[in-house]
Amino acid sequence: MKDIDEKDILPFSLEHNFWTWSAQKKVHPIPVVRSKGVFFWDESGKRYLDFNSTVMNVNIGHSDERVIQAMIDQLRELPFAGPGMATKPRALLGKRLAEITPSGLTKFLYTLGGADANENAIKLARARTGKFKILARYRSYHGATHGAAAATGDPRRTAWEPMVMPGVVHFLDPYRYRSSFHMEKPEISDAEFTRDYLRHLEEIIEYEDPATIAAVMIETVTGTNGILIPPQGYLEGVRAICDKNGLLLICDEVMSGFGRTGEWFAVDHWKVKPDIMTMAKGLTSGYAPLGAVAMTENVASTFNERVFEGGLTYNGHPVSLAAAIAVIDVMKQDGLVTRAKKMGETMEEMLTELADRHPSIGEVRSIGLFACLELVKNRKTREAISPYGRTNPAMTAFRQKCLDQGLFLYTHWQNVLILPPLIITEDELAEGVRILDSALTIVDSSISV
Ligand SMILES: Cc1ncc(COP(=O)(O)O)c(C=O)c1O
């Protein structure tokens, strides 16, 4: 874009934009001007290593020419078509998605992102079952629109309460490091741990009455709330409980999908088949806005004769669909799912080594290139470095030090998330981990032990 000097990007942007997730007087946006691979650059020429795939979405890396070209080709051929029209990218994307999603998910409804994918998932589950309650977990995020925020468990819901969508009931996450049930019994086996959390879910279902519950909705591997990986048997157990009680299972794979965990979708690790699966982010790797709701024939058939009263002007936007097709093709060509699994193991080793040197790291959790360092004041008591829902000066200083040294990453209260693009090399990982190593000294020196 030629009609603005790069040095004006920041002042002009600050003048007229209202920023999300921010106090307006306290924003410090990075004036980004270009990106390539695992890096982006600001207007001063400073390079950032992107350890968060920007918004946990640029899975294939930045500025891949193959995707850009596919989008340009689509713009030239047909820049727009209405939601009720059949187009080449619509014809092709459904086939691609059916190939990579768990068998049984055969129909795809397109949205603009993750939140509206979850909104539609809730509508579909309610329509299919004729019931209205949605059981979701406390340590979850499902999006910022009203229904998705009502399903969200964390403070991104409570900040806006009362929510307009009734019928959401929250339950506890199987979060081993902070399990209320097992504080005094940390040595409990995985099987017992899983059993206790499945019992907890069953108890809630009983109190709420299965005849009123449409679905259980979970992030398959929890994202921003700290990379919580389901313990052995948990996901299969949730599936069985849903089947027994006539509930649908909605898996939110907005963040955990598209190779992030070392499988196409996180559910693949446990071979669990949801009735509805939502996706966004990695679907286009950020090259265009797009979300999707994958559903079984059983769910879709609710609307064989009955009208699905819902839609969006930009449902199935041809350029977004073309981007998604190109992204899936790039992922296949470059073997990025397998690569994520392999590099994920390397990353886990590096992070575990980091934990040996830094007393502030309470736990490392990781699956594929989806990892988290949970920072604590005290490893024995596991007291988190920042209280639930808040940050603290040491975390703020830690993140700033990372940014100063050219490492872009996301921190969420006591958690440092690490989700680089799936194309990252071992040397690039090591570069980021060296910066983490130096910045973590700030957190170490803020704690007592
Ligand atoms: C698990 C999960 N679900 C839903 C969303 C919402 O997606 P979007 O921001 O595209 O609406 C997010 C976004 O971070 C997410 O992580």
Image: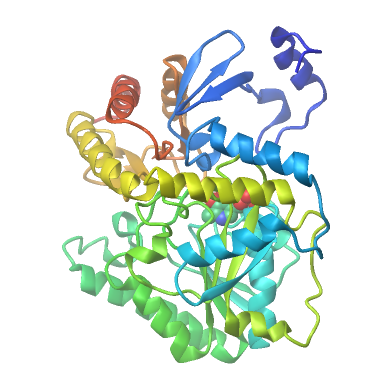
Q: Position of residue 372 (x, y in %)?
A: 36, 43
Image quadrant assignment for residue 351: top left
- Which quadrant of the rendered structure holds the N terminus? top right
Which residue is located at x 61 percent, y 35 percent? 68
User: Which residue does the image show at 50% across and 51% down from the upper left?
Assistant: 255
Measuring 79% from the left and 86% from the top, which residue is drawn there?
306
Q: Where is residue 195 in the image (x, y as percent from the top left)?
A: 29, 77
Say whether residue 219 is visible: no
93 vs 398, left or right, is: right
To which quarter of the image does residue 166 belong?
bottom right
Residue sitting at 43 percent across and 50 percent down? 332
Position of 312 relative to 193 (above/below): above
Which residue is at the front of the view, 304 or 383?
Answer: 304
Q: Position of residue 137 (x, y in %)?
A: 50, 65
Asked whether 158 or 294 is in front, the reply is: 294
Report the side of 113 relative to 226 (left or right). right
